[in-house]
Amino acid sequence: MTLPILAKENILLNTSVGTKEEAIKKTGQLLVDRGYVEAAYIEKMLEREELTSTYMGNFVAIPHGTEDAKKAVKESGIAILQVPDGVEFGAGNEVKLLIGIAGKGDEHLEILSQIAIVCSEEENVQQIVKATSAEEILELFEGVQ
């Protein structure tokens, strides 16, 4: 069974988290629950964050696993966590949008570039943060297949 890379079930709106670790775990759990990755992937996401922050600017973080986490990936997919009140991501960086990525092989690079295009526009990020439905967010990420 092939899962779509992004579906409305992969989007959590109005989430509240206390720490970046909690935010990353929630994003990873969404990937686990939807069948994209094995549970071990979440630990690899946290390891990756310790190596280098996945904060990208514009209130966006893109947590993903380390290189050796690939064996825990079953299908390429994206999970989106909307955190309107924001969460501290270190160095004074606030994140309101987490986009968790799991990619088979090198597919994550293509997914990342498509996400970067959407998130490079600050107005797109604001729309995603203020979105009241998963469908609104899906429309903005239409090109991510």
Image (cartoon, grey):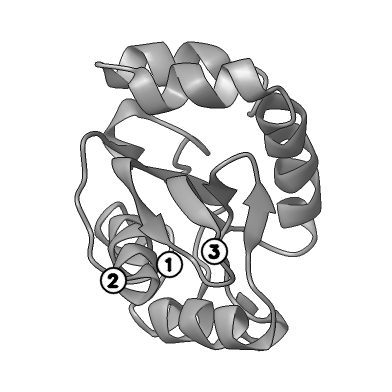
Q: Amino acid at mark 1?
A: Val
Label 2 vs label 3: CA separation?
A: 17 Å
C-alpha gap between disc 1 and disc 2: 18 Å
Circle 2 packing at 10 Å, graded few (<14), some (14-19), many (20+), is some
**Towards the viewer: 94 or 81:** 94
Q: Are marks 1 and 2 in contact (CB under 8 Å)?
A: no
Instruction: Describe the element under mark 3 as helix, strand or loop.
Output: loop
Q: Give residue 113's quadrant in the image.
A: top right
Q: CA distance from mark 3 to mark 1?
A: 31 Å
The residue wearing badge 2 is: 22
Image height of 82 relative to 107, above or below:
above
Q: Which one is in front in this view, the residue at disc 2 or the one at disc 3?
A: 3
Q: Residues within 10 Å of mark 1 (few under 14, many from 20)?
A: many
> Which circle, 3 or 1, is nearer the viewer?
3
Q: Which residue is mark 1?
A: 37
The answer to which of marks 3 and 1 sits earlier in the sequence is 1
Residue 139 in the image: state x and y as whole percent.
50, 11
Image coordinates for residue 13, horizontal then vertical, percent: 24, 34
Residue 122 placement (x, y as % from top left)? 65, 24
Q: Amino acid at mark 3?
A: Gly
Does residue 141 appear in this view? no
Query: Is 136 situated above or below 47?
Result: above
Whichever of labels 1 and 2 marks the residue nearer the N terminus, that label is: 2
**Left or right side of 63 for 57:** right
Question: What residue is drawn where x is 35% and y is 20%?
Answer: 130
